[in-house]
Image: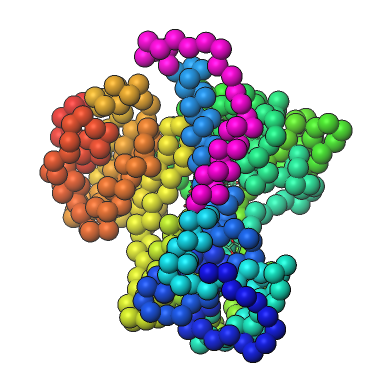
């Protein structure tokens, strides 16, 4: 429902949600299901937030299309399928991505209608703990509610010396729509965005150089996983430079120049800055209201997502924790369920994380380094894709599954997967861990044959040294 906006009396609601990303729109719908009269304020004309508009969805659409292009070019012959005359139609590929985004963002509009969530288009600002002003191209509105939920997400971080021009030197949003394949793309930051979008443009023909400050890619992931990821991505042609401090980047002439400490400047065609994201809280009125944030602007909340100002709540990328769409969704649901029912909970120990490269990289729970640092005794089971029948049939033999279980209780503590469909395989591990399963529980469950799911069963068996197929 797109509401008529005007400057009259404040319109009353039970809950005002600011931001319609996966945190905000899911919270708004769940609150409406629970019987609340809900308003959702979003400054963009399309709903869905970073995730649907310029994040998860468009990046996955391009990852899928570019993977098909690369597979057709290089990986079909082994199946006895000879192709010739393969050509890239970039504008069509980008157009498909835009269509996917449009369909999904339009879908949220329909869901709002179905659930009678009142939608207000414009920038939302808290003028008190119970009143939000909306202003934008569609006019102004004043809304009141006893509870306000901030779900304004995040925006890309930059670096000192980087002259971000939103064209040649830009972030993920620009890299989702380059009008031509860059001859040479320099990616600053070997995190999730750098590897996903770096992979897209490498597959489409760009030379890709990734500059990373740390000594490996995907810092924070299990060491085995990041080492294998770097090995495989290097083999695919991505050029990594680790331990590099970027001191500047700018567009120059037809291309760009990237300056690094202690090294020669690097010339390239485009620069993708992917060094993390920061909370989006500008102009929200937080300071005036006294909402506590940390030094990076991250909103501080208690365990039911209430900020330092009673009645004002926050979820998703603006609060601590991994910046992931499903984490934001879980928080949105838990937050509004607690408001209405008194119960609501997110199990932060079991939030899966996936990098949608080829192969995919996925994990849930603790890494080996974290267990060592915490002095937790653990057992380890590992099983390679090459020993799995389905992986052989798929010609997808790179990677492994690694299971970490408590040495005494056998309870699953972490599962780390690199390989084909790792992102789908991790779901079984997450559900098992949420139910407190042991490695033995997974190992004793019947897994259909031949499936990649058998990899997890075998890795769970390997925890006790009894994997069958190796
Ligand atoms: P957001 O999705 O950022 O939504 C916040 C919304 O609030 C925005 O629509 C914004 O316009 C609006 N807003 C902000 N301020 C105001 C205001 N004052 N008034 C009104 N509206 C306002 N995560 C995954 O889990 N899987 C992935 O595959 C994945 N891929 C990604 C790929 C890329 C390229 C990027 C950039 C991110 C990706 N992420 C992924 C991260 C994911 O997008 C975020 O974690 C998620 O969108 C956070 O949800 P949110 O609801 O907290 O915020
Ligand atoms: P990131 O935190 O994943 O990676 C940033 C990388 O940049 C790190 O490796 C870091 O060491 C490096 N870095 C930081 N400063 C640097 C510097 N000065 N020079 C060189 N390297 C530097 O951040 P991102 O890739 O920008 O992604 C942002 C967020 O979006 C992440 O939190 C991620 O969770 C989310 N995201 C998730 C997905 C997914 O779930 N598949 C996909 C994309 C983005």
Instruction: Specify the quadrant of the image occupied by residue 255.
Output: top right
Q: Nearer the viewer, residue 349 or 58?
A: 58
**In screen coordinates, is 171 left or right of 113?**
right
Relative height, residue 382 to residue 2 (above, below): above
Residue at image x 32%, y 77%?
343
Give yes or no for residue 103 being in the magenta stretch.
yes
User: How was this image coloured?
Assistant: rainbow
| Magenta range | 76-104
Location of residue 5 (image quadrant): bottom right
Residue situated in front as seen by the camera: 7 or 441: 7
Q: Where is residue 216 in the image (x, y as percent from the top left)?
A: 54, 38
Q: Residue at x 64, y 57 (%)?
A: 155
Residue at 65%, 40% in the rendered image: 177
Seen in the picture, residue 331 relative to 126 is either above or below; the reply is above
The image shows residue 418 at horizontal and vertical percentages of 39, 36
For the stretch drawn in magenta, the main secondary structure is helix
Residue 48 seen in render: yes
User: In the depicted view, which residue is nearer to us: 106 or 80?
Assistant: 106
Nearer the observer, 50 or 211: 50
């Amino acid at each position: 429902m797109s509401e008529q906006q005007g400057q009259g009396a404040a319109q009353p609601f039970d809950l005002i949600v600011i931001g319609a990303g996966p945190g905000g729109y899911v919270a708004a719908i769940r609150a409406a299901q629970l019987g609340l009269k809900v308003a959702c304020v979003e400054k963009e004309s399309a709903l869905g937030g970073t995730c649907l508009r310029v994040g998860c969805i468009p990046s996955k659409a391009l990852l899928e299309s570019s993977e098909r292009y690369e597979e057709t070019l290089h990986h079909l012959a082994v199946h006895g399928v000879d192709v010739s005359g393969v050509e890239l139609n970039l504008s069509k590929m980008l157009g498909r991505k835009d269509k996917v985004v449009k369909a999904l963002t339009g879908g949220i509009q329909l869901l709002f209608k179905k659930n009678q969530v009142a939608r207000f288009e414009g920038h939302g600002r808290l003028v008190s703990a119970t009143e939000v002003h909306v202003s934008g191209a569609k006019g102004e509105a004043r809304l009141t509610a006893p509870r306000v939920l901030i779900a304004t997400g995040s925006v890309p971080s930059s670096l000192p010396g980087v002259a971000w021009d939103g064209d040649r030197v830009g972030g993920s949003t620009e890299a989702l729509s380059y009008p031509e394949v860059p001859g040479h793309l320099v990616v600053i930051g070997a995190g999730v965005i750098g590897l996903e979008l770096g992979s897209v443009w490498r597959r489409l023909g760009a030379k890709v150089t990734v500059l990373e400050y740390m000594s490996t890619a995907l810092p924070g992931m299990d060491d085995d996983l990041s080492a294998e990821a770097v090995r495989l991505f290097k083999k695919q042609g991505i050029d990594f430079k680790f331990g590099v401090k970027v001191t500047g980047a700018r567009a120059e002439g037809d291309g760009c120049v990237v300056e690094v400490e202690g090294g020669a400047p690097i010339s390239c065609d485009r620069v993708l800055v992917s060094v993390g994201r920061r909370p989006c809280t500008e102009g929200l009125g937080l300071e005036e209201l006294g909402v506590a944030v940390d030094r990076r602007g991250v909103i501080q909340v208690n365990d039911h997502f209430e900020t330092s100002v009673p009645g004002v709540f926050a979820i998703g990328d603006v609060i601590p924790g991994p910046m992931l769409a499903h984490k934001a969704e879980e928080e949105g649901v838990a937050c509004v369920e607690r408001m209405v029912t008194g119960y609501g909970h997110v199990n932060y120990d079991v939030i899966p994380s996936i990098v949608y490269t080829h192969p995919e990289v996925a994990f849930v729970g603790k890494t080996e380094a974290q267990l060592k640092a915490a002095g937790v005794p653990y057992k380890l089971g590992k099983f390679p894709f090459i020993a799995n029948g389905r992986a052989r049939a798929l010609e997808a033999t790179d990677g492994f599954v690694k299971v970490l279980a408590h040495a005494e209780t056998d309870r699953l503590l972490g599962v780390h997967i690199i390989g084909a469909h790792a992102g789908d395989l991790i779901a079984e591990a997450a559900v098992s861990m949420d139910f407190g399963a042991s490695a033995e529980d997974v190992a004793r469950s019947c897994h259909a044959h031949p499936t990649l799911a058998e990899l997890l069963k075998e890795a769970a068996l390997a925890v006790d040294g009894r994997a069958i197929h190796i």
